[in-house]
Amino acid sequence: MDTSVSVVDGPSLADGKPMVRLPPPPDTPGLRVKAILWRLLWPIRWPLSRLLWMLSWVFRIIQWVAFGLHVAIDYVRLMYLDYTARPDDIFIVSYPRSGTTWLQMILYQLTTDGNMDFAHIAEKCPWFERSAISKRRLDKLPSPRVFKTHLPYIWLPKRRCRYIYVARNGKDVAWSFYQFYRSHFRYRGSFEQFFRLFMRGWVAWGSWFYHVRGYWKRRNDPRFLFLFYEDMVRDLEGTIRRIAAFCGLQIPEERMAEIVRRCRFDFMKQHEEKFDYAFELLVDQGIVPGRFLRKGQVGEGQQSFTPQLHEEFDRKFQRRLAPLGFPLR
Ligand code: A3P
């Protein structure tokens, strides 16, 4: 039997499509019996598969309900029991895709030496309501603490601290949110379909109109600073100075140029993994990206074995695999 691999004419390597056609592996009598049984069972395969599909959906729904309850309970716990406000706490508040991450970076630069030696900005400026799930210890953070939140006004923890709200043109938000849904939530609908959901508020974080309305009404409250994304784009330095003044921060004049440079789009884009929500999820789970293809060497890991570990492994190897003739390489 010819088991060679033949090259298929057609797409070039650049397409990433298969360029080879594999011959079938050798058949065995056992496999032939299995194939006959498989064909005989055909009439019940379909209903059985549907039944299991339904069962898996039941468990999925139970899982969603349980998740919803778990989040609600943890949030109530966070809001009313675990979170103790400090007078210098700062909340960055926004509807998603309005410039939240940008404000996180601005406040990080203003309240620290601004070094980029962190895995994700959420370490320095955590997402308030998500800490109910991610189990971040907010009470361990040094003052002044800066939180980000997307909560609508009604859910916001209202204490004696500072709130900076950023609003952005709703149409730009809708488009940016659609792109985010596609890249991070595997959304496959068209923009028109997404737009309908957005207008009804049937998207994560609900209605943009409701969100902005709730905070716009509080724009004159001295605890609130109401900003617009468009103004930040137009005059970044001016916005940074407004934020610093609102928070009562004295920034040495010689630091300002560097802060502005680091808060510009191109600098943040260069460090995108430190701001991307996808990496926040990984970092929250304790996963360190970029360590998957590690060294690719023979015996490198064994240098870290103690004599006891070597001995333990060798003993089990001798018992379980050596008698079968399995070679040790
Ligand atoms: P686009 O998708 O239009 O590019 P959020 O952090 O609230 O989710 O907002 C994300 C939006 O803010 C994205 O908009 C992102 O590019 C923009 N943004 C983040 N940092 C920025 C910066 N330094 N300058 C301008 N826009 C920035």
Image: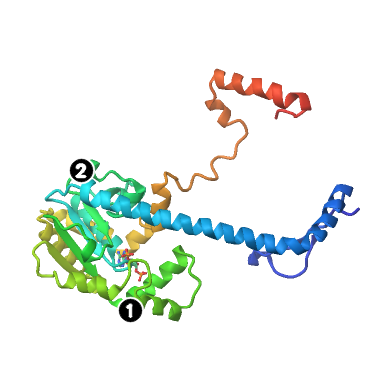
What is the quadrant of residue 227 in the picture? bottom left
* Residue 185 seen in this snapshot: yes
Position of residue 187 measured from the top left corner of the image (x, y, whole percent)? 48, 69
**Along the polypeptide, which appears first: circle 1 or circle 2?**
2
Q: Is mark 2 within 8 Å of ligand 1?
A: no
Residue placed under numbered mark 1 in the picture: 171
At label 2, which amino acid type do we have?
A: Pro
Mark seen at residue 318: none
Position of residue 212 measured from the top left corner of the image (x, y, whole percent)? 23, 72
At label 1, which amino acid type do we have?
A: Lys
Position of residue 108 measured from the top left corner of the image (x, y, whole percent)? 24, 53
What is the quadrant of residue 24 in the picture? bottom right
Position of residue 3 measured from the top left corner of the image (x, y, whole percent)? 85, 53
At x 45% / y 79%, what residue is drawn? Answer: 193
Residue 3 versus residue 168 in the image, above or below:
above
What is the quadrant of residue 272 in the picture? bottom left
Q: Real-space Cα distance between discs 1 and 2?
A: 37 Å
In the rendered image, the quadrant that contains the C terminus is top right
* Residue 18 seen in this snapshot: no
Q: Disc 2 on helix, strand or loop?
A: loop
Residue placed under numbered mark 2 in the picture: 142
At x 33% / y 47%, what residue is drawn? Answer: 118
Camera-nearest residue between 50 and 120 = 50
